[in-house]
Image: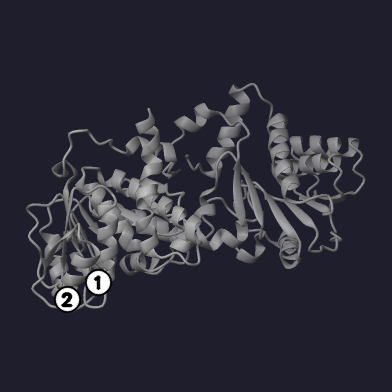
Amino acid sequence: MKILTCAQQKEADAYTIAHESVSSINLMEKAAALMTDKIAARWDKTHRIVVLAGPGNNGGDALAIARMMHLKGYRVEVFLFNVSGRLAADCMTNVHRLQECGCAAYTEVSKTFDPPQLTADDVVVDGLFGSGLDRPLDKGFAAVVRYVNASPAQVVAVDIPSGMMGEDNSYNIRQNIVQADLTLTVGCPKLAFFFAENEELTGRWEVLDIGISREFTDNAETRYLITEEQEMKALVTPRRRFAHKGNFGHALLVAGSYGMGGAAVLAARACLRSGVGLLTVHTPVCNHLLLQTCVPEAMVEDDVHERFFAEPAETDSYQAIGIGCGLGQEDITAEAVIAQIKECEMPLVMDADALNTFSAYRNYLPLIPKGTVLTPHVGELERLIGRCSNSYERLSKAKELAAELQCYIVLKGAWTAVITPEGICHFNPTGNPGMATGGSGDVLTGIITALLAQGYSPEEACRLGTFVHGRAGDIAAQQKGEIALTAGDIAEALPQAWKTLTQDSKER
């Protein structure tokens, strides 16, 4: 699914009206009908519906919702803010329709707003401003927003919380943005919805299909997309009947240190559970017995050091390398990491302490081979790019780093972003908060390393690996709950996760 800019979504509406034989008022009616159904399904008629409508099309949507809720038998109170004395044409049409349907509790605010007393049983429909807003709210509208936010009422935002901008809110005034419990957006989600700091503003959000032109959407250029399951199913390469282990690559994991052998175990298990033909783990001597016992399918190659990674491994016989899980940050390890990566001529995944090494020795960043996959969480990324004030800035700087290094960045989070050297961002839809646990990233490193060893391109390995990692986390959460979830549970759920992506092709 493409994520369009707010400007593009406005163009999409206009294109649909011009080419799909549909009027703007009918598009508005369809959007309002879908939103009304969502509201009615969540709140019964014991709740009062308080509608705050602005003078534009967003206000028109809200007025149409008010009419439909009234006709369903809800107690509806409407406030239309018309301080300039000018209403959009479709908004004016919905004013007339609302009045014709017999909704008596209608107030048009031109100067002074006498706000209703809002209680916890009230539902506020926020239709003040839509995605066309290009500056922070101030004065009277800011006061209305703060009043709503201070109330105990539940809030439904029409398309986008009033005051929020669809992409970059770096220069916005946070307290002047509506804090919604539910956001019902049309066409496609806004980029701002994918940023952690905006979660308390959007609440839960849903995308509603109102029939925007598929032709426009298909041809629209965007650098932001949401990965879809059918895409991932199409990527999975089926196994031939006469295949053998040599067809699926030999991967090398450079992982573990004294007290961190578990990271090597988790990465190794995930790698083996993701289809690799052979796996060797290069690890300090202290982890030899642990790995041989916990992951008997993997071969173990001892480092020269008892406790730390100290000497680069020979790599001639491998098809992909994953490095960094649980390595630690000893000086001798940093030197070995730099030497290992400097000489690497095959697909490479860098995680955890491999990334921390290069944040400490930034002048060595150009040594990272082109096409390498970096898998940082937010903290690891900011050690490389510097502190960021918000997620939009962080994502922008991550794109700059990917372009500079010609690498792929898997920025881990609730919506993990796979960023290509060309600046394309693929947001991953699978996963859950239970995966925010130590070792989860080691599992992801193992998966991506296995896919690279099997011949998947870096972009394919990142997107498919991230998707199946999240799917395994979802399966594990269904079985054990989010609170009790461990990284080991994610690794153990990988077979079932892979099965969900391959069942259909086998049945065909």
Identify which residue, 303 or 394, lies in the foreground.
303
Q: Is residue 121 left or right of residue 178?
A: right
Q: Residue at x 35, y 35 (%)?
A: 234
Q: Position of residue 30 (x, y in %)?
A: 70, 33
| Spatial separation of the CA atoms under disc 2 and disc 1 | 8 Å
The reply to whether callout 2 and callout 1 are in contact (CB within 8 Å) is yes
Q: Position of residue 453 (x, y in %)?
A: 20, 48
Whether 107 is drawn above or below 15: the answer is below
> In the rendered view, would you say 180 is above or below 5?
below
In this figure, what is the number of numbered marks? 2
- Mark with earlier residue (2, 1): 1
Residue 227 or 280: which is nearer the viewer?
Answer: 280
Q: Which mark is residue 286?
A: 2
Residue that appears at 84% across and 56% down: 111
Q: Secondary structure at mark 2?
A: helix
Q: Which corner quadrant of the image does residue 255 belong to?
A: bottom left
**What's the residue at 32%, 55% (across, down)?**
409
Residue 164, picture quadrant: bottom right
Q: Is residue 186 left or right of residue 43?
A: left
User: On the rendered image, what quadrant is the C terminus found in?
Assistant: top left
Q: Position of residue 313 (x, y in %)?
A: 10, 63
In depth, the one of 70 and 454 nearer the eye is 454
**Circle 1: residue type:** Gly
* Percent coordinates x, y for residue 404 in the rendering: 26, 54
**Residue 159 shows which numbered tag?**
none
Q: Is residue 101 above or below residue 126?
A: above
Would you say 165 lies left or right of 271 here?
Answer: right
Residue with the mark numbered 1: 261
- Disc 1 is placed on an element classified as helix
Looking at the image, can residue 398 be seen? no
Q: Amino acid at mark 2?
A: Cys
Can residue 412 be seen here? The reply is yes
